[in-house]
């Protein structure tokens, strides 16, 4: 169905439902040029990218090609291309750890507060003693396993694809085949087969890094929350819901400070 609109600076124009937004955008651009007397580049106006602060000109080295790039680098840490590549990988790994941490904290806290399991609050879980191994043994094993995994990841960052070569991982290389640095694949690390075409998986990368950034902020909130209230996030949520107008972050901070 077509709609005929009249009026505006440049007169009437015809819109079709399937491309009305593009036509409206072009008409607005033409109208701006007519008013200001200056030529306007339609492609530049239409493709103007979003930034973390509207109207802010992003630094030239953040050209919008990276997933989640909104031009945010107030300290100029990414000016060096080599450093920028490393920061991208570092953020990705921290985002994934944060997402796992948030999920683990919320799940265990929910089991604890509902009485389903007798688990310690998350910030005391590290002091738990186990019968099958001592704390020192667990720390050593964790260092060895994490050290091995992080060394493999770093070597793949330095030389992409090197860790997928035959004989580099006990014959399991095909099952852990990486898609590109920072994005491992195979049935173990990509069981659902998402984003197999990693070169055209920008939307998946964007969703992951957005959720990861939210998780990192949530972890920061958990740290502050535990330090101030000495309880878990579910306990704090229940307390807030019991009296939403008087059990807020403002009252909590003022009470802890006094």
Image (cartoon, rainbow, N blue to C red):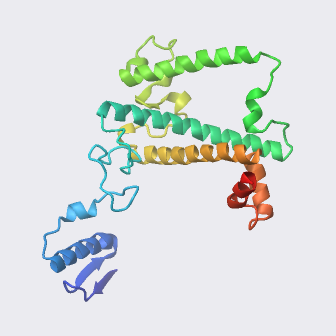
Q: Residue 132 in the image: x percent, y percent?
A: 80, 16
Q: Residue furthest front?
A: 258
Count the marks: how many? 0
Seen from the viewer's position, the closer of residues 230 and 95 is 230
Q: Is residue 92 visible?
A: yes
What's the residue at 61%, 37% (across, down)?
Answer: 100
Q: Quadrant of the C terminus?
A: bottom right
Going by the image, does 30 lie left or right of 57?
A: left
Going by the image, does 216 lie left or right of 13?
A: right
Q: Residue 19 in the image: x percent, y percent?
A: 30, 70
What's the residue at 75%, 59% (across, down)?
Answer: 240
Q: Is residue 192 visible?
A: no
Q: Image height check: is 201 above or below 250?
A: above
Q: Quadrant of the N terminus?
A: bottom left
Q: Residue 227 in the image: x percent, y percent?
A: 71, 43
Q: Residue 212 in the image: x percent, y percent?
A: 53, 43
Q: Image height check: is 168 above or below 13?
A: above
Q: Which of the 4 image quarters holds residue 7? A: bottom left
Seen from the viewer's position, the closer of residues 134 and 246 is 246
Q: Which of the 4 image quarters holds residue 162? A: top left
Q: Image height check: is 246 above or below 52?
A: below
What's the residue at 28%, 86% (across, down)?
Answer: 5
């Amino acid at each position: 169905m077509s709609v005929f609109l009249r009026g505006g600076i440049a007169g009437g124009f015809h819109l079709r439902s399937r491309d009305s937004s593009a036509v409206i955008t072009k008409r607005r651009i033409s109208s701006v040029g007519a008013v200001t007397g200056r030529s306007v580049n339609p492609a530049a106006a239409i493709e103007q990218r979003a930034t973390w602060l509207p109207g802010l000109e992003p630094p030239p080295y953040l050209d919008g090609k990276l997933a989640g790039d909104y031009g945010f680098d107030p300290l100029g840490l990414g000016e060096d291309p080599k450093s920028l590549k490393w920061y991208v990988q570092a953020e990705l790994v921290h985002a994934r750890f944060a997402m796992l941490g948030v999920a683990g904290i919320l799940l265990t806290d929910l089991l604890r507060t509902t009485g389903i399991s007798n688990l310690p609050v998350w910030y005391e879980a590290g002091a738990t003693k186990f019968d099958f191994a001592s704390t020192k043994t667990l720390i050593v094993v964790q260092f060895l396993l994490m050290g091995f995994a992080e060394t493999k990841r770093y070597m793949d960052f330095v030389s992409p694809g090197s860790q997928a070569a035959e004989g580099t991982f006990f014959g399991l290389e095909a099952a852990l085949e990486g898609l590109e640095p920072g994005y491992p694949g195979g049935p173990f690390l990509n069981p659902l087969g998402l984003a197999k075409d990693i070169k055209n998986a920008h939307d998946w990368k964007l969703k992951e890094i957005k959720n990861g950034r939210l998780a990192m902020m949530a972890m920061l909130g958990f740290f502050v929350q535990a330090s101030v209230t000495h309880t878990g996030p579910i306990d704090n949520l229940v307390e807030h819901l019991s009296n939403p107008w008087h059990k807020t972050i403002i009252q909590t901070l003022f009470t802890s400070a006094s």
